[in-house]
Amino acid sequence: MKKQVGKRLYQYALQFKGSILLALFLLMIAVAAELTGPFIAKTMIDNHILGIERPWVEVEEDGEVIFSDREFIRSDRFDGDVDTHHVVQVYQQGLNYYFIDEQVPNGGNRRVENETLIIERGERMETYSVTSLSNTEVFQFFQPEIRYLIFLMGGYLLLIVVAAILHYHQRYLLQTSANRIIKQMREDVFGKIHQLPIQYFDHLPAGKIVSHITNDTEAIRELYVRVLATFFTSIIYMTGIFIALFLLDSRLATVTLLLIPILIVWMILYRKYAGKYNRMIRERLSDINGKINESIQGMPVIQAFGREKEVSTEFETLNQEHYRNNHKLLSLNSLTSFNLVHFFRNLTFVAFIWYFGGGALGVGAMFTMGALYAFVDYINRLFEPVNGIVNQLAHLEEARIAGERVFSLMDEGGIPLSNEKVERFKGNVNFEQVFFAYEKDEYVLKNISFSAKQGNTVAFVGHTGSGKSSIMNILFRFYDHQKGKITIDGTDIHTITKQALREHMAIVLQDPFLFTGTIASNVSMSDPSITKEEIIAALEKVGAGSMIRNLPNGIDEEVKEKGSTLSSGQRQLISFARALVFNPPILILDEATANIDTETEELIQQALDVVKEGRTTFVIAHRLSTIRQADQILVLDHGEIVERGNHESLMAERGKYYTMYQLQSGDKKAPAS
């Protein structure tokens, strides 16, 4: 799964490879520009700041420096034969400079005493007469170097500006690409949710699904925005630095290469321990979201029964576990990240001091001051990307775990949305010996058989758990039955895609769900093919005309979340209009009048008498008075049809339906059956 997660994250990145590759190309140029700095500094120090200590050739004319009415040119810039000319030197000791009117050999321990330079080579001692130079005289020897220094500094400043511009564009491109990747991923996850079967949501709280779409994808976004950007930048920086170190000294550069296997081993060990904590953190975060969502949805019940303290305790338990795992991960990061880099930085500098400082003792190597500066600068720069990689390991592991969770959701079995169309149904529905179970072999519907002709109204009655809603669930294909056959106009519903089937059906639930928007958008479900006139006509048919006219904005009145500002009756009328505006040949009313007052119920009954003509209507009702005019009434008990007929025939049988009707009508003396 780990490899698969990495591969799939990589595949998402490939969708925007053009901008990512361009960003990496700009990054390489920017890094190259930045890493020239130590080389330029080395040149400035060795060739132009300390360069005045090189031999100076005395010339007749056109000299670079005039000192004591004599002209001199630095030997490395002299075009003639140095051996045929008089050569002098400038010697620095501390902050003092001295003029030596002859060339002095290199090496040995040196000191100046009483205008004399003393050089000790073992037991041998050499002396040279020196003249102390004033600041003005020293500046005369530095003056030829100024133009070179200004040129080099100006060039480096230009490189810094170019690098800054390139860094801006590469960072912008990488972050834009990352945002586009996450935008695509969120759309894919959200689209996948609409393909999942209803039973998937029976076992997973809404808060956990929301966590997948928001928190987990945001963690993955950090992977593309920060982690990968840091890794790419660090790898390119380290590559450039190693190249520069090899150019300076291959032996020391080879030693510094040991950092790479150490870093790789550290990443492997870190992932082993951090993965466990990150997985628990993501799980608890999902649980927290689920608990918050559940508490908000059930706040009226929680407050009505005074369970605020108990719910808070449950939340605190989840929050404490989330905190505990976060604390463990934080301890791991604090113990290792900075300490690890700091340790190796110090270890490298110990080796560095031995290598350079030991040169004087014959156990290291001799280098110029400029090379020494360049090495120090590059080694300091080397640990910046190392530190960046180590510090991003936590985000990398967090993103990997989040990726596992997102892709596990996307791998759930679902049915891709289909554009298949079928000819409008007439509405002849037939159930033939249908069996259905939510759980294996625990059938809630047994041997269900009935027929509904076009234009018929079929009602289902029975006690809670008798199977009424389950019949509607399998007809709408929210769930699929295991045995038997259901046909519409002679066609098995399993041979039709769910989208094509539902296009010709509409359902009104007992607890209507309204979306944030307007009344018009809720009735039309934002379908642009449905006009305002059709929306108003549907509302009029269900008796909601007066309600709409009394609202300040009419059908454009704002609807809050779940229609909280509307009464249950108003919400139900809107849901009826929603079903009718699509003009379905099959209409399902799942206890749609259970939560409606008597006056509104009468309006709906009048509307239904108008709209059900030519349309097959299935009604699940607790109020038996609302189905007296049904063409067929099916009485269910424990998943089986125990009685069937119209109102008059069932009353004449004096069975279960008769008992239920008498109890609802207030006649307590009705005999039980």
Image (cartoon, helix red, strand yellow):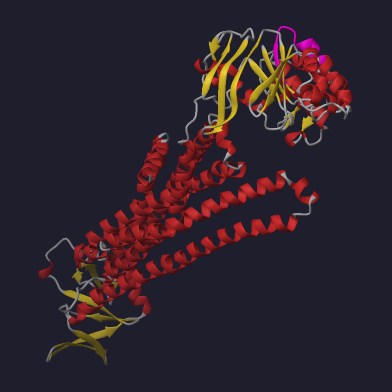
In-image side of 555 versus 217 (left or right): right
Residue 608 shown in magenta = yes
Q: Is residue 369 above or below residue 100?
A: above
Can residue 550 be seen here? The reply is no
Q: Provide residue 302's location: percent of width, then percent of height.
A: 75, 50
- Position of the N terminus by quadrant: top left
Whether 68 is drawn above or below 34: the answer is below
Quarter of the picture containing the C terminus is top right
Residue 654 percent across, percent down from the top left: 79, 20
Report the residue at 82% width, 24% height from top. Answer: 661
* Horizontal and vertical percent position of residue 397: 43, 53
In this view, the residue in front, 396 or 589, is 589
> Which of the 4 quarters of the picture holds residue 70?
bottom left
For the image, the number of numbered tags is 0
Judge left or right: residue 153 versus residue 649.
left
Q: Is residue 236 left or right of residue 614?
A: left
Q: Front-most of 281 and 527?
A: 281
Segment tinted magenta in the rendering: 607-619
- The one nearer the camera, 165 or 48, is 165
Q: Is residue 217 visible?
A: yes
* Residue 265 sits in quarter: bottom left
The magenta stretch spans residue 136: no
